[in-house]
Amino acid sequence: MTAILGISAFYHDSAAALVIDGEIVAAAQEERFTRRKHDAGFPTQAIAYCLREAGLAPGDLDHVGFYDKPFLKFERLLETYLSYAPAGFRSFATAMPLWLREKLHLPRTLRRGLAQGPGRRFDKRFVFAEHHESHAASAFYPSPFDEAAILTLDGVGEWATTSYGIGRGNRIELLGEMRFPHSIGLLYSAFTYFAGFRVNSGEYKLMGLAPYGDPVYVDLILDKLIDLKPDGSFRMAMEYFAFGHGLTMTSARFARLFGGPPRRAEDPITQREMDLAASIQQVTEEIMFRCACHVHDVTGMRHLCLAGGVALNCVGNGRIQRDGPFERLWIQPAAGDAGGALGVAQLIWHQLLDRPRAARADDGQRGSLLGPGYGGDEVRAVLDAAGAVYHVVADENRLCDTVAGLLADGAVVGWFQGRMEFGPRALGARSILGDPRREDMQSTMNLKIKFRESFRPFAPAVLLESAADWFRLPAGHDSPYMLFVAPLEDRHRATGSDAGPARRGFERLNAARSAIPAVVHVDGSARIQTVDRARHSRFHRLLSCFADRTGCPVLINTSFNVRGEPIVCTPADAWRCFMATDLDTLVVEDFVVHKREQGAAARRRAEGRPHRFPLD
């Protein structure tokens, strides 16, 4: 047996992943255990979970890999600061103490983190892969393809911001890259910052805001900010950006170009922010599409694998899927930095140790259900300690039929089943579910349960066998990891003046658009999760029961958390979130908890909210 641990840490979304004899055994982000969203610290608890899942101690590991090369990254930082000096001194003075104290001594930090107790040592050597090499490995090795083109797009690794190459069998070869500071990820993050959202957290808000705006700034972006080439490469006009030397993403010149300073967090969102979001989203999609077409021209491959944080832009993915030259796409569900932990572990197994990839009909990600699960005794102990009133429904058919009935009657349900998802998407293991047919459900769930902006869209989970009847997915394509956007089929769209584009901005929010308005965005699209029996048997059964009752094989599926907090990990996390929100029912494995039965404790939950929940 060969056990390989992969680690990503110290920038954002730290994670650990364990691969044994080429199979993914466990993977999780540190944030789920510490309850600090996007936790960047050493993933002590994620590592402990991965080892516990396999019954291993640190000394049993054969190899440990880290997802990037810190000395190359330090070289890039020094060269960048020197090129801007003295303008970048404040940023330099902020970053250097951490580098000198910790990041330049990463082997020592890793050994300390993996030591088995006071006075003990972890004496094995570490493997350091390049950042985009780790992304490429995470994209190709779990994919269902024997050979494929690979495209990775993010903010920046060491120097690379975009890379492409080929995967064949157990080998990866990177053929080209775009380098810092010219970065599609940093370009998108600059607009995220300017719109008043958090960088490395709020990019999905910007994507969700885009359909409310008009892309009126596209020509200005292409004329002033970037020089875009036919192959998708581009150069940024750095006088408009400050991320290379300052403590902000954009400069005063950027603000003058777009009519004023950045929006402050929590200030009202104006038409300017909506139009900026629409414009940079259109530009980003065009860059992604041109990159994909160029990679196809160079490699001649039929299939494409994607990773890197930009690969979470499901609207751009949808355009490549619908209009691009590839027959099939596969995207790493944990496409951001967390997935680098998985990538480096698989890179060691296949590329360093030269072990073959097993032939498979489907991908090797195991539904991305790679986190911890909890048994009935553990759930009962948590609920008993909380003094909860609950019901146990051990028969799966009866449980799913009961919950389907609650959802059909308008209840909002916290659904906690099996192993936790790896990656940013809730896929039916740690989800909040609702009825998508209700016009007010989007605003209700955003404002009363998630405590976030009412415009934020929700995703539909749809039975795989019914997906083609509801959404325009290319033939033969599924979307089990919620990474593609597709249009709703015309027969399910609303007709009449209320559904047209005459309204602007948030006036579009409550317009009647479809038979499932809570999950169809204002542009008639949806970020789809197709649910099949093999990956998600109980969730598939619940959707089937809901379809039997309502004729609708679709549910709202959003992550089980509130604003500013990570997705719940444990039954105790689920209970706390349930009691702090207006969720009607909590279902943890076979245990059903109704809010109305919890008495005075449920009434006390509202005290002080939503001020407990930080910005995200």
Image (spheres, rainbow, N blue to C red):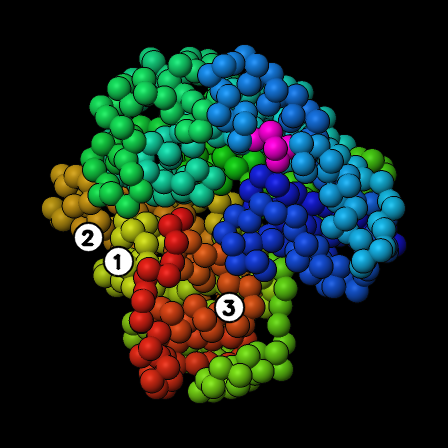
Q: CA distance from mark 3 to mark 1?
A: 24 Å
Residue at the spot of label 2: 510
Question: What residue type is disc 1 on?
Answer: Ser
Seen in the picture, residue 374 relative to 314 is either above or below; the reply is below
Q: Describe residue 505's horizontal placement relative to residue 580 as left or right.
A: left
Write the residue at 37% across / 50% down. Answer: 615
The residue sitting at 33% across, 85% down in the picture is: 600
Q: Which one is in front, 317 or 163?
A: 163
The residue under label 1 is 443
Residue type for callout 2: Asn
Quarter of the image where one finds residue 190: top left
Image x and y of residue 145, in percent: 67, 40
Locate residue 97, reporting x and y percent.
Answer: 61, 33
**Residue 319 percent across, percent down from the top left:** 43, 34
* 410 over 341 or under it: above or below: below
**Cα distance in 3D space between marks 3 and 2:** 32 Å
Label 2 or label 1, whichever lies nearer to me, is 1
Mark sitting earlier along the chain (3/1): 1
Q: Looking at the figure, which quarter contains the N terminus? A: bottom right
The part of the chain drawn in magenta is 95-99
- Extreme residue toward the left, this view: 497
Query: Magenta stretch: residue 152 in it?
Result: no
Are the residues tagged 3 and 1 within 8 Å (C-beta)? Answer: no
Q: Which residue was labeled with disc 3?
A: 573
> First in sequence: mark 2 or mark 1?
1
Secondary structure under badge 3?
helix
Q: Nearer the viewer, residue 538 or 443?
A: 443
